[in-house]
Image (tube, helix red, strand yellow):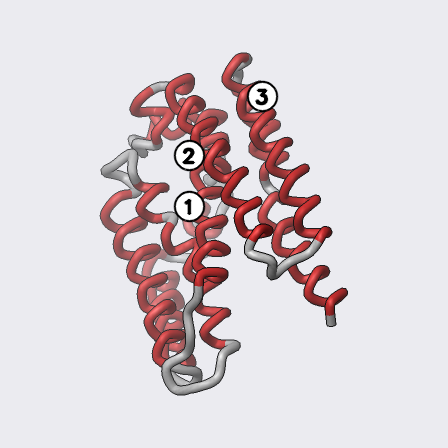
Amino acid sequence: MNRTKHRPLPSGRITPISGLRFGLALIAISILLSFTLNLLSVLWMALGVLDNVGVYSLLLKRRSALNILLGGFSGGLPVLFGWSAATPGPIGTISLLPVLMAGLVFLWIPIHIWFLAVTYRSDYAKVGVPMLPVVIGPVPAIRLIVIFSMILFPFSIGVYLLGHFGLVYGLVALLGGLVNLVGSVWVLYKPTESNAWKMFKISSPYLFLLFLAMIIDVALRA
């Protein structure tokens, strides 16, 4: 792919075998260190590796348009891992808040990546990677982006309504959700690669701003 040809593996700066060894070493170290925390931390770490490496990279990335959706579960698992790692006890804990926070990541991933895939649709098609815009076309894919944006917006407000975060998060969720939703509808009515690229860039800091707002709210309360 033109977009990725200068990365370490495609450019030959790292050989596949050395990349594999380094990746396996990181996986082993990560799972072993998880055992020093609690059982739920081990579970979330292992599931994250299984989904990202096994389900997404090995099984679906080059075979199915569902690659981003089913592979997106691993994107939300670090939130659950962080929650369990920060809770005491040999097992760890789970509650509605971290599940919803993980859900924010899961819902955001297809919006963000499908905008990229619309922009580089011909590049993905050339190398046979069945991203959703390649398989069903850019306009139907953008319709799905709008649907996911319509779900993500009230979902982020729902996190605020739980009462764990204050006005900072509420305002960021409201404004960020509106920008993302309105921008998605705008691309639907003007479905060009340039507009999809603009929304890819605009959606990039969305999660960062949401989680930063959470941190600020908790710090202000403390």
> Which circle's residue, 2 or 1, is located before the other in the chain?
2
Q: Mark 1: which secondary structure?
A: helix
Residue 165 falls in which quadrant of the image? bottom right
- Image side of residue 222 versus residue 27, left or right: right
Question: For the point 48% across and 50% down, which residue is it?
Answer: 105
Taking depth in this image into account, of 60 and 69 the one nearest to the observer is 69
How dense is the environment of label 1, judged by Cα within 10 Å: few (below 14), some, or many (20 and up)?
Answer: few
Question: For the point 50% across and 37% down, which residue is it?
Answer: 112
Q: Is residue 191 above or below residue 174?
A: above
Labelled disc at residue 85? none
Q: Is residue 198 above or below residue 73?
A: above
Q: Nearer the viewer, mark 2 or mark 1?
A: 2
Q: Nearer the viewer, mark 1 or mark 3?
A: 3
Residue at image mark 2: 1
Q: Is residue 43 above or below residue 55?
A: below
Q: Nearer the viewer, mark 2 or mark 3?
A: 3
Residue at image mark 1: 10
Q: Position of residue 124 (x, y in %)?
A: 38, 30
Question: For the point 72% across and 52% down, which residue is it?
Answer: 168
> Which circle's residue, 1 or 3, is located before the other in the chain?
1
